Image: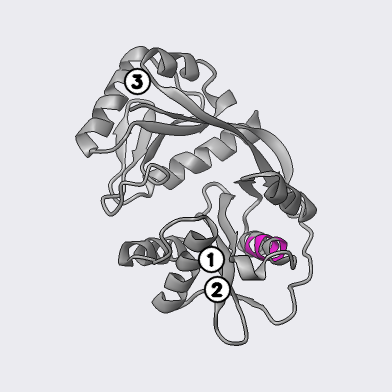
Amino acid sequence: MILDNRVQQCVVATLSARPAPVQVGPFVVGVDPTTTSPHINYATPRPGATVTAADVTALVAAFRAAGRRPRLEYVARCAPGLEALLTAAGFVVEARHTYLVCLPDTLRTPPTPAGVDLVEPRTDDQRAALVTAQNEAFGQAAVATAADVARLRRQQAAGGVAVTALTPSGDCAGGGAAAPPADAVSEVAGIAVRAPYRRRGLAGAITAATTRRLFDAGVEVAWLEAGGADSWRVYQRVGYRPAGERLYVSAD
């Protein structure tokens, strides 16, 4: 339960760092005016807080006022009665995901595939190439916007990590990132490899490099979620282990 609370507090900190966060009773809503993406604009409860039906009503109103779809992501055990309140208010469960954690003594670093360098993007062109590669790998609009680049730049400036995989020709083969740590906990996300560079061990190398940079900076717990069986195996090979459940809930 202590680990659940630390991961949940990490999410609270991440949303509180959005450009226009909104505090609603026991919730924080992470609002970013540059995008309507529900994967960026969502809410989460503070761990251990008491939540009432009136709080949920106020939360929905805050989303409406911000012009965003009501949506939450949270560690299920940190708010055991919240799901019932949300479903009573018309919310629907999108998914239940197991989150995995890695500690400094469990991290295993595989070799980086030949012909690829794993580096921190330092220019906006490099940041744009990384976001473009991530978008391509995840089946989204490939072009990185100026807002995407600025978001990654702010994340790095606040203590987050980004890793890009560069080929000898300067192409970005993929990459990953991690949020600025909160109480020595950080989320690793966006681990992506473009199709021509897959099946070479690059995803594991990117995950390990991103995680290693966190630990070198003093992070004690890195966590992430697996998008499927293949990524689950990749993360377990570099030392991540299942730890708890996160709930995704939204309303029309």
Residue at image position (33%, 19%) is 55
Q: How dense is the environment of label 1, judged by Cα within 10 Å: few (below 14), some, or many (20 and up)?
A: many
Residue at image position (28%, 54%) is 34
Can residue 102 be spotted in the picture?
Answer: no
Q: Inspect the image, locate mark 3, and give the three-letter code of the amino acid beneath it.
A: Val
Q: Which residue is mark 2?
A: 120
Identify which residue, 6 or 136, lies in the foreground.
136
* Element class at badge 3: helix
Residue 213 image position (x, y, % from top left): 63, 65
Prevailing secondary structure class for the magenta stretch in the rendered image: helix
- Left or right: 251 as drawn, with respect to 245: left
Q: Start and end of the magenta stretch?
A: 204-210
Q: Are marks 2 and 1 in contact (CB under 8 Å)?
A: yes
Residue 97 image position (x, y, % from top left): 60, 35
Q: Which residue is mark 3?
A: 56
* Element class at badge 1: strand
- Left or right: 235 as drawn, with respect to 161: right
